[in-house]
Amino acid sequence: MKSLAHKFALLALLAAAGCSVNGNSGTLNADADSAIFQPKSTSVSGSAVGLIGTKTIALTYDDGPKSGLTDDLLNFLDDQGVKASFYMVGKNIIGNEHLVERMAEQDMSLGNHTYDHTPIVKMSKTNMQGVYNEIKETDLLLTPHLRAGKHIFFRSPGGSWTNLIAEAMNQMPDIAQKYIGPVFWDVGGTTYFENMQGQRINGEAVKYDAASGLVTLVRRGAGNAIVKKWSEQSRSLYAAADWDCSVPALNIPVEMCAEGYLKEIERRQGGIVLLHDTHAKTIAMSKILIPRLKALGYKFITMDEIPNIEKFE
Ligand SMILES: [Zn+2]
């Protein structure tokens, strides 16, 4: 067993070497027995685990727990008999430990989403030990709630990841031996209006008027002037990201947001669905989406129940 000091020296070396390494380069000597943090190419998504096309969904809720929202969601999931997976931010667990315990009681899957929602790829370039600390601190908060026989998962903030981080974390047996990840997603994360022909939106670039259905794409010009670039009527989403649905300026009705998720799920016929239990609108949307998906014959599983989980252990 290497000493801790030795391991951090190795991490420092990896960090120094990684200044120009991006997600597609670097090598990973993946030892199937211990390399739990996967390189980008084999990271966990619905296609990797065989959910696409099977009418099976893994609902994943990130960034919580949040008092008043996560408990409301857990009540609803309990009523519906639906299980989900949670990727939690360590600082949000503090004071909300009872919510993590409730998740475990309801047989939800528990996941680590760093301590402070830190952009770890940026951090890894100068401070790989900081990346380890981000994961480890949350690990210490989650582990007391983890039931015997359950896996624990990792999802990186923003989904950013590099082989270099995978390689470094796999040198840390106290976390590499237990985690599966990073977990990506198939549904959610991008908002498209039905008639916008692929134009991605975000809160700063698009205004949506729910009453008229008018979508206006704007860009900030010199002196912060708003320049209208595009405008069209739209009353439906082709795909949705729940955080866009919660941007006040966009004013997207919750029903419309649910429709965006539903359409993307229907196109893929299953997958890992990205959501956030930190937005009231996401909880409201879940209450629309879940019964509708059930009526369409979808099954809900947690990440612990993915069909070929042994591939990632
Ligand atoms: Zn997040």
Image (spheres, rainbow, N blue to C red):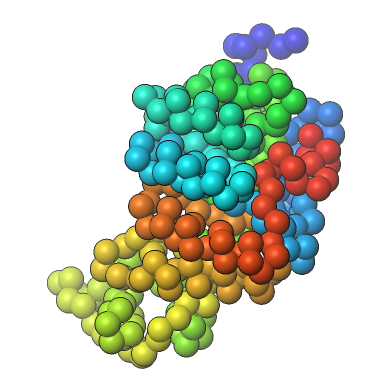
- Name the residue located 31 percent from the left edge and 70 percent from the top edge: 250
In the image, taking residue 274 as reference, residue 278 lies left or right, namely left
Of residues 159 and 244, the one nearer the viewer is 244
- Name the residue located 38 percent from the left edge and 44 percent from the top edge: 69
Q: Quadrant of the N terminus?
A: top right
* Up-down relation of residue 122 to residue 24 (above or below): above
Residue 235: x and y, percent? 40, 84
Residue 293: x and y, percent? 61, 64
Q: Give the farthest residue toward the left.
A: 223
Of residues 24 and 57, the one nearer the viewer is 57
In the image, taking residue 66 as reference, residue 35 lies left or right, namely right
In the image, taking residue 230 as reference, residue 36 lies left or right, namely right
- Name the residue located 71 percent from the left edge and 11 percent from the top edge: 2
Q: Is residue 313 visible?
A: yes
Q: Is residue 112 visible?
A: no
Q: Quadrant of the C terminus?
A: top right
Residue 217: x and y, percent? 33, 80
Specify the quadrant of the image occupied by residue 215: bottom left
- Name the residue located 78 percent from the left edge and 28 percent from the top edge: 34
